[in-house]
Image: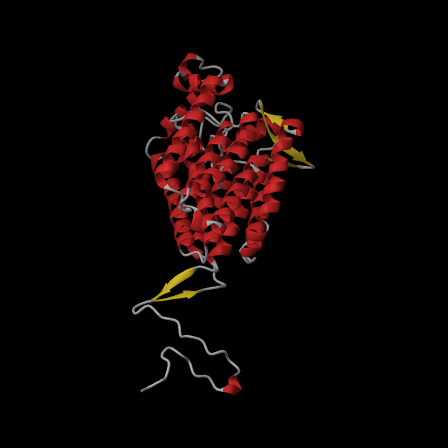
Amino acid sequence: MDNRQPNRRIVSQSNARTVRPAEKKPPVQLLIRLRGGVDRPFLILVLILVCLGSIMVFSASFAYAGYKYDNPYYFVIRQSVWAMLGFSVMILTMQFDYRIYQKLTVPFFIISTILLCLVPFIGSVRNGAKRWIIIGPISVQPSEIMKLALVMLLALYISSNRDRMHTFRYGIMIPYVMIGGVMLITVIERHISATLILFLIGTIVIFIGGAPTKILGGFAAIGATIMGGVVLFSSYAKERVEFWLHPEEDPSDSGYQLLQSLYAIGSGGLLGVGLGNSRQKYLYLPESQNDFIFAIICEEFGLVGAVSVICLFIALVWRGVIIAMRAPDTYSSLLVFGIVSKVTLQCIMNIAVVTGTMPVTGVSLPFFSYGGSSLIMLMLEMGMVLSISRYSYQEKK
């Protein structure tokens, strides 16, 4: 009888290698692990969006900047500096092994929570909302940091309990305690948009992580009911909903911004009035360089330009999903899914606000809206996605 053991590699003693079973390989394709090369399509899309965003900040802001600061380049200079700084942060971030972020998850979440709790006490008020902390020449919005911190925490938790995520305790109760605690702070700050985004991001990550679908749907419905209750019983949110439904009732005050945004979109038509030729940015549309910059895009580039920008975001999200599906482990996969979900939700909500599909709220358009801390945080997240793409599994035909 032949006593030889199959699937054993016989190695000479001089090579000093351990004898181990040979790995089974797929019959047609071999999955290999690549390290070193980032996902180029994702990187190119990020660079295109950043460049287009800087151009549109200048186009949307030079009239207001010239009026208020006597310098039409005031906003674009600062946005360009932040874009270059953000690009440096992205390049640096994508060089690190993504497992470093896994180790830093808990300290990062604790710091983010502390900053978020400090906002009601030392926060700076802008446009009637206290959401920023001034640190020297930089203003930081802790809710933006918390969105990433929550994604990282949920990814770490699910990766450590993935075999128990099908249960109610580990798949629903504990994750929603984490999400609810963060949401409570943002509700106290009257930051309704951040509360909604945190809830939706958390729900998406839990769903992808393997939570029981039927129970998760019930909790999502309960969460939506609670959000509706906040709107009904909060005079701040209720007022915004009322003027969203009937902006024409107060066209010179509460309904003014939405009406001017709709005028800008309507003026653009199919092909737009041309880059730099917007009329609404001449002190008609408030926050034209910030939350309502998409209205200027529609006015200057028309329906074709608006759809083109949306297609760029769709391509970025699609590429991010591919990176997540090829990620080497649960933590990295959920982290990419969470970051991509955040970008997707902010795009949808910003465009919905600008077009009058949902009440006016403070949600910026990623890569386009003016703002330093938000752009740097976004580029940090893009760097994390690119870092994970360096370790992705890809198919070799």
Report whether residue 45 is seen.
no
Residue 366, position as x, y percentages in the image: 48, 39
- Which quadrant: the N terminus? bottom left
Residue extending furthest top? 249
Residue 132, position as x, y percentages in the image: 61, 31
Q: Is residue 338 left or right of residue 121?
A: left
Q: How many marks?
A: 0
Residue at the image position 41 percent from the left and 56 percent from the top: 326
Instruction: Indicate whether 278 appears above or below 248.
Output: below
Report whether residue 134 is seen.
yes
Instruction: Indicate whether 278 appears above or below 13.
Output: above
Depth order, front residue of 38/1: 1
Choose top left, top right, bottom left or bottom right for residue 298.
Answer: top left
Instruction: Indicate whether 7 appears above or below 148.
Output: below
Residue extending furthest right? 136
Residue extending furthest front? 1
- Which quadrant: the C terminus? bottom left
Q: Is residue 285 left or right of residue 104?
A: left
Residue 122, position as x, y percentages in the image: 67, 29
Depth order, front residue of 124/169: 169
Instruction: Indicate whether 226 appears above or below 249.
Output: below
Depth order, front residue of 177/370: 177
Depth order, front residue of 320/109: 109
Residue 384, position as x, y percentages in the image: 52, 51
Residue at the image position 55 percent from the left and 37 percent from the top: 144
